[in-house]
Every structure is written in structure tokens, then in C-alpha cells.
Image (cartoon, helix red, strand yellow):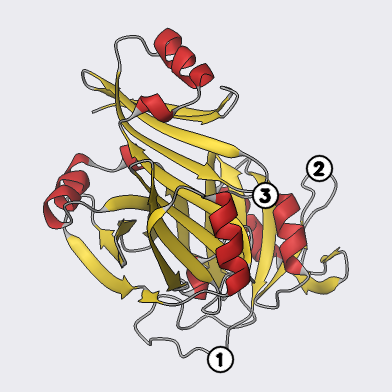
Amino acid sequence: MKTFSVILLMAMLAGSNLFKPVDENRASKELTAASVFTCATVDTVIVPATIRTSFDTKYPNATKVMWYQYTPDKTQPVDPMAWYYGLDDKDYYVTFNWQDADYIAWYDNGNWIRSSQNIDNIDLPADVMRAINTQYPGFRIADVDMERDNKQELYEVKLVKGDTKWNVHYLANGTVARKKERHLNKYDPQADMTADFTTRFPNASEVVWYRYNPEERIDVLPTDWDYNMDASDYEVRFKMDGTDYQAWYNDGKWVRSEAALMGNTSKLPATINDMLKTQYAGYTVKDVETEQNSDRTIYEIELSKGNEKCKVHYTSEGAIIKKKCRTV
């Protein structure tokens, strides 16, 4: 799941030169043609007033706004057919929250060209869900973005099954616009990681280690948990207590774990089960996933009742972080 955390961003920027950020306090600063913003010791960046005007017009009252100057990664060739092929270091992008959703918008030569919104899988059109279930049986939806440009609206769906990953772009009617397949490569991990893994997951079985297969850098934000991951890092997949798990190691250190509990609520903390019985009486639990990092554990629960679908994010203490319901 993608999050936009300023604290995490500041920690990451010190070691990154792919994007140069501008910290914007909307209450006290105004972007003009001569405005220069600094963020700690990061290089200054000038954001033209025309871009700010375009942004404010398209996304009025946006919050958590953070501007970046794009710096091409010259070590990686860019497909001439890729949407970002023409971007250079005179272009910008911005992350923000608008209408209670996290966005990223891109500007080329001062003009808006593209935006992407991270959404829940329950927000996918019914035709797209039917296409996924037909074309990719047994695959798990790992992430969904809704992308817009001047020509069309697409749903980018990342699917995972075993060591196979698919990145599929769908039109709202379920038609595939483009797709890309990736495979993880098995690899023997370092001894210090296996020692940590054995201690952290003592009942693990069917353990398989892989070299981490990084996404294209244009798809990974400095605020994403995997921003610093590269091909020298590791992903490990295993079973524990009958549940499929994934864990990631960055520079030899554990950073994150995920598990797909399916509809099994018996593995949820008692506090969450009690909350579900009270808050969602009569609903059926369709799917449960858990994400854990060094800070906290989050449980993502999908429920349904008749034509209504809900997705609720709980902390392990039972506090609701986010919830969303819709009628289908």
C-alpha cells in the first residue's frame, strides 16, 4: 500500500538524487516565477508560477502538497513508447492529498500531463474485476492506481502469484491496454539475514528467497516504503501456520512483512474481531491481509453485505485508520 509520509520522505531524501523536493507550506508561502524553496540541505528548486496556477485550478484546496523536480536516471534506458520518455530536469511532479485520496501529478514543459491516484481494489469497476478473475485466477491484487492523462483513464493493477508478478493496465470496460510480466529469481541469502529470519519467523516452512525485482523508478515515490530497495536486496516467501507470507530485507535488515489471511478471522486479534461483530454485524468477511513494519501492524479487511462492499484498515489495537464502503 502506498502512503505519503513526510517524516519518511525526509529520512529518504538524504540518500537520493533521483528527485529533488520542495517543501511547500501553503499557509505562508506562495510559488511565483522567482520563488525558491529549500528543504534542509537539499538543492534549491524553482517552481514556475504557471505550474502552480495550473495545479491550484485543477486540484483546489489540495493538502499535504510536496513538489519535486524530476532528474532522469541516465543509467537506465527509457523506452521511447513510455509516457515519461520526454521528461527532463526542467519538469516537475507533485504529491498531495485531494478529496481524501493520495495523488501524484506530473508537469511537462509547464503543462499537466498525467495524474495517478492510489485506490482500493473495491473501487475497481466491475468489468475490471471480472477480467482479473478470468485472466489471472489465483493471483492476489497487491496494489491499484487509477491513472489519468489527456487521452484516457486507466487502472493499473499489480498482481502477484508465487514468483510471478503482472502489471496490467485496464480500461474501465475491462479491456487490457498494456501488460508486463516479471519473475523473481531465486537466490541464497546472506547468513545474517537467515539468522534474523529464523528468529523472527520460527515456524516458517516452504521458505524461498529471491532477489528483489525493483519496479521502474518512475513508479516508485520517495515516500514509498520500497523506495530504497534495489536488485541487491531480498524478498522471501514462506508459509507459517498455513498462511502465505512475504518479507523484505533491505541492506540485510528486515523492513516489512505481509500476509494474506484470506477470509480467516481466527488469526485476527480479539479486539478486532470484537469490533467487527459490533460495527459490521451481518457482514461477511471476504478477505484479510496484514502488513507489518518496524512501527506497527495493520489489518486490511474486506467485507460485504448484499450489494455493499467495505474495506476497513485496523491497527492491532482495534483502532480504525481508514474505511470505505460502496454499493456495487
The quarter holding residue 250 reads bottom right
Residue at 82% across, 71% down: 42
* 21, 135: nearer the viewer: 135
Q: CA distance from mark 1 to mark 2?
A: 39 Å
Q: Residue furthest left?
A: 134
Q: Which of the marked residues, 3 or 2, is nearer the chain's N terminus?
A: 3
Q: Mark 3 and mark 2 in contact? Answer it, CB < 8 Å.
A: no
Task: From the image, tell me which residue sits under label 3.
Answer: 5
**Residue 27: numbered disc:** 2
Give the class, few, some or many, for how many residues have Cα within 10 Å of label 3's Cα (few <14, many ≥20): few
Q: CA distance from mark 3 to mark 2?
A: 19 Å
**Residue 66: numbered disc:** none
The quarter holding residue 130 reads top left
Task: From the image, tell me which residue sits under label 1.
Answer: 75
Q: Mark 3 and mark 1 in contact? Answer it, CB < 8 Å.
A: no
* 54, 302: nearer the viewer: 302
Classify mark 1: helix, strand or loop.
Answer: loop
Q: Residue furthest right?
A: 41
Foreground tag (1 vs 2): 1
* 215, 239: nearer the viewer: 239
Q: Which of the marked residues, 3 or 1, is nearer the chain's N terminus?
A: 3
Q: Which of the marked residues, 1 or 2, is nearer the chain's N terminus?
A: 2
Residue 253, image x, y percentages: 64, 64
Q: Is residue 278 left or right of residue 53?
A: left
Could you tell me the amino acid type at mark 2?
Answer: Ala
Q: Does residue 132 appear in the picture of this structure?
A: yes
Residue 126, image x, y percentages: 20, 40
